[in-house]
Image (cartoon, grey):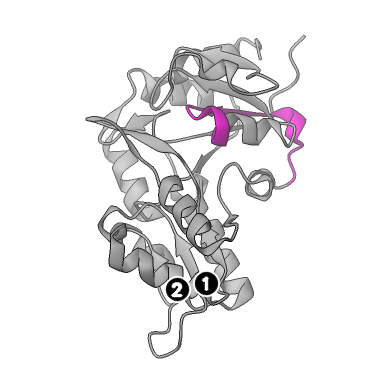
Amino acid sequence: MAKQVRMVLIDLSGTLHIDNTAIPGAVDALNRLRDGNVPFKFVTNTTKESKSFLHDRLTNLGFDIQKEDIFSSLAAARKLIVSRKLNPLLLIDPAADEDFEGLVNADHEKNAVVIGLAPDKFNYEELTKAFRLVLDGAPLIAIHKARYFKRSDGLALGPGAFVTGLEYSANVKAEVVGKPAAEFFKAALFDVPPEDTVMIGDDVNDDIAGAQAVGIRGVLVQTGKYRHGDENKIVPPPAKVCSSFVQAVDCILNKEI
């Protein structure tokens, strides 16, 4: 018999939408989950857009969501920067700047490197600046290390390749604050037990393996960045593999997970 589901954590890019296109049926499926009185929260590693930008995108696609329901790796990174009183070099996309307003003092030396998905900043000069800071002892903080993500024109490199390059050159290990970090999932849950929670996502490593490592049931959807056979790449395997978010919601409402 399936355990009670008291919280559903939902990935965004690749699970509910790809760029400016909603996954077919996802809007109605989310409404059905809400109508079924199943609490949910959106947990995302998206670093290319601020929470406001992302919320606007999703509402324009027809999703009925509240901004406060989005728990992002950007928010986790901001919290870490504030708690440690860091003045970081930010390698992030301009669309995400809003989430870091007031954190960087241009008149003081940088003492950390914080890196997300920043295509325009992944060039030799910017990465060399980051490398020199890290080589001199500044912590390297990865908002996440995704290998790739799905765009409308196909798969594209994630920040993981560039984080790993800095790790290799400076001979350090980055601290990861987003998925699959255990602390990220724990912070998203608040007081809901992991065993009463389901995570739905398209990334078998960051979404599913990360969630299951803290006791959350992982549901892998075959949309977005999913590649054939992904479900066989982790141990234990996903609790459930579904064709899309629509089927995942059906399974939850039918108590099949």
Q: Tell me the tag on residue 232.
A: none
- Residue 138 relative to residue 120: left or right: right
- Residue 39 relative to residue 66: left or right: right
Q: Which residue is mark 2?
A: 132
Any magenta on residue 200? yes
Residue 38 placed where, x, y %? 60, 27
Residue 179 placed where, x, y %? 57, 43
Residue at coordinates 63% horizontally, 24% vertically from top-left? 234
For the residues bearing labels 1 and 2, Cβ distance under 8 angstroms: yes
Identify which residue, 5 or 224, lies in the foreground: 224
Of the residues shown, which amino acid type is indicated by label 1? Answer: Leu
- Packing grade of label 1 (10 A; few <14, some 14-19, many >=20) is some
Identify which residue, 35 or 228, lies in the foreground: 228
Q: What is the magenta range?
A: 191-207
Of the residues shown, which amino acid type is indicated by label 2? Answer: Arg
- Tell me if residue 64 can be seen: no
Residue at coordinates 75% horizontally, 32% vertically from top-left? 215
Identify which residue, 61 or 242, lies in the foreground: 242
Instruction: Look at the numbered disc 2 and give the secondary structure of its residue.
Output: helix
Identify which residue, 72 or 178, lies in the foreground: 178
- Tell me if residue 158 can be seen: yes
Q: Which residue is mark 1?
A: 135
Residue 24 versus residue 137 in the image, above or below: above
Q: Furthest residue to the bottom?
A: 107
**Real-space Cα distance between discs 1 and 2?**
5 Å
- Residue 10 relative to residue 225: left or right: right
Q: Furthest residue to the left?
A: 153
Residue 211 placed where, x, y %? 65, 34
Instruction: Look at the numbered disc 1 and give the secondary structure of its residue.
Output: helix
Quadrant location of residue 207?
Answer: top right
Residue 9 placed where, x, y %? 58, 34
Residue at coordinates 58% horizontally, 12% vertically from top-left? 251
